[in-house]
Amino acid sequence: MPTLTEYMQMLPEFFVPEKANGVDTKVQFDFTGDDGGKYYVHIHDGVCDVHEGEVAGARTTVTAAAADYFEIVEGRLDPMKAFMTGKVKVKGDALFLMKFQQMFGRKSA
């Protein structure tokens, strides 16, 4: 099973640039608990960059237990249900987070 860092570093592989036209923003992820950490994703110029640490001026900050994030990524926990039950907390532009999710998907071979 990949680590949290490995999951975050895989995000650019699933980025669909066409779904991010004109977007230039940063999203902060704060993961708590075992294997937790802080990461931010910078979407700009049709590119998705992932960095460890914190960034000032993030449009949206997502806070969740690392274990819950693993469940979401692996498809065992619905992201909306996690949000509605308080497992995922969002600060800032929560509506943008829905658009952010749409910028990622499986790429066909």
Image: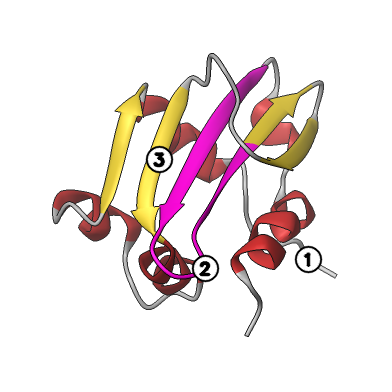
Give the side of residue 11 with respect to residue 31, left or right.
right
Closest to the observer, 13 or 64: 64
Closest to the observer, 28 or 109: 28
Mark pair 2, 1: CA separation: 31 Å
Mark pair 3, 1: CA separation: 28 Å
**Residue most toward the front?**
34
Mark 3 or mark 1, whichever is nearer to me: 3
Q: Quadrant of the C terminus?
A: bottom right
Mark 2 or mark 1: whose residue is earlier in sequence: 2
Closest to the observer, 94 or 68: 68
* Residue interval drawn in magenta: 23-40
User: In x, y percent, where is residue 36?
Assistant: 49, 60
> Which residue in the structure is indicated by mark 2?
35
Give the side of residue 14 with respect to residue 40, left or right.
right
Q: What element carries label 2?
A: loop
Question: Type of residue at label 1?
Answer: Ser
In magenta stretch: residue 39: yes
Q: Quadrant of the N terminus?
A: bottom right
Tell me which secondary structure the magenta stretch mostly adopts: strand
Mark 3 or mark 1: whose residue is earlier in sequence: 3
> Which residue in the structure is indicated by mark 3?
62
Question: Type of residue at label 2?
Answer: Asp
- Please rate how many residues cluster around mark 3, counting C-alpha atoms within 10 Å: few if below 14, some from 14 to 19, many from 20: some
- Please rate how many residues cluster around mark 2, counting C-alpha atoms within 10 Å: few if below 14, some from 14 to 19, many from 20: few
Mark 3 or mark 2: whose residue is earlier in sequence: 2
Total count of labels: 3
Check if mark 2's residue and mark 1's residue have beta carbons within 8 Å. Answer: no
User: In x, y percent, where is residue 78?
Assistant: 31, 65
Q: What element carries label 3?
A: strand
